[in-house]
Image: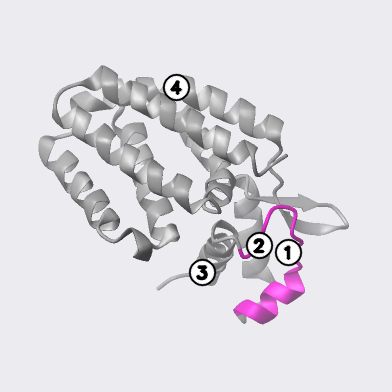
Amino acid sequence: MELLADKAYRLIKTQILGGKFPPNTPLPEAELQRSLEMGRTPIREALIRLQQEGLVQIVPRRGAFVQTLTLNDARDLYHVRSILEPEAVRLASRHISPGELEALAKEFRELLADEDAIDLEELIQLDQKLHRLFLERCGNPYLAEALERLHNHSQLAWALSAQNRAEMLQACKNHLALIESLQQGDVEKAAGMMREHVLAMYRAISTLTR
C-alpha cells in the first residue's frame, strides 16, 4: 500500500513536471493539504524530498516554491551532461542486449506512430528511461553517481522543455536513431548523437529561461 508521503510526493512532482506549477510558483502547505486531502506531515515530507531532488526550494519563514532554473544553471548543467553522457553511452553499449535495444526501439516507434496524439508526459518518461538505461549500465559507479545527480537537477529542465512540443518530438526521433545506431554497432555515432541531443535540449531551454 502506498504511503501518504509517497503519494503526496508523486502527485506534487507530477504537477510540477506537467507544468501545472511553473518555476517560482509558491506551494503553500495549507493549499496542498486541501487539494490532495492529506495532513500536514505527508505534505511536508514530500516537499523536503522534492527539495532534495532540486525541484522545490524551501525558504525559511516564506515556505516552499517550485525551483527556478536560470540560464546560467542550464548552461552549466548541460555542459557537464554533454561531456559525461556520451561516455556513458560508450560504456553502457557493452552491457545492453540486442533484445533490450529492440524493446526500447519498439516503445519509441509506437509513441511516434501518431504524432498528433502523443502524450508529452509519456514522451518525457520514455526520454528519461533511455537516459537512465545508460546511467545504470555504464559500469562505472562514479560516473553513474554523477549522472544521477545531474538527472535529478534536470527534471525541472525536462518540464520546461515539454512546453516545446516540436522539440520534444524531434528528441524522440533522435533517440530512436541513436538506438538504431547502437543496433548497427556504431557506438561512436550513438555517443555523438547523445552529445548533440543534450546540447539541443540546452538550446531549447535557453529560449525559455531568458
**What are the residue bounds of the magenta stretch?**
20-36
- Up-down: is 142 above or below 30? above
Q: Is residue 22 magenta?
A: yes
Q: Is residue 30 magenta?
A: yes
- Up-down: is 190 above or below 21? above
Find disc 2 in the rendering and name its residue: 21
**Three-letter residue code for mark 3:** Lys
- Horizontal side, residue 196 vs residue 203: left or right: left
Q: Please identify, in this view, whether the residue under mark 1 or under mark 2 is nearer the observer.
A: 2
The tag earlier along the polypeptide, 4 or 2, is: 2
Q: Please identify, in this view, whether the residue under mark 3 or under mark 2 is nearer the observer.
A: 2
Find disc 3 in the rendering and name its residue: 7
The tag earlier along the polypeptide, 1 or 2, is: 2
Q: Are marks 4 and 2 in contact (CB under 8 Å)?
A: no
Q: Are marks 1 and 2 in contact (CB under 8 Å)?
A: yes
Q: Position of residue 85 (x, y in %)?
A: 41, 26
Find disc 1 in the rendering and name its residue: 27
Q: Residue at x 21, y 28 (%)?
A: 181
Secondary element type, mark 1: loop
Which is more toward the observer, 124 or 38?
124
Q: Please identify, in this view, whether the residue under mark 4 or under mark 3 is nearer the observer.
A: 4
Secondary element type, mark 2: loop
Q: For residue 44, say whether it is visible.
A: yes
Q: Residue at x 51, y 36 (%)?
A: 201
Q: Are marks 4 and 3 in contact (CB under 8 Å)?
A: no
* Disc marking residue 84: 4
Cα–Cα gap, marks 1 and 2 = 8 Å
- Up-down: is 115 above or below 105? below
**Three-letter residue code for mark 4:** Leu
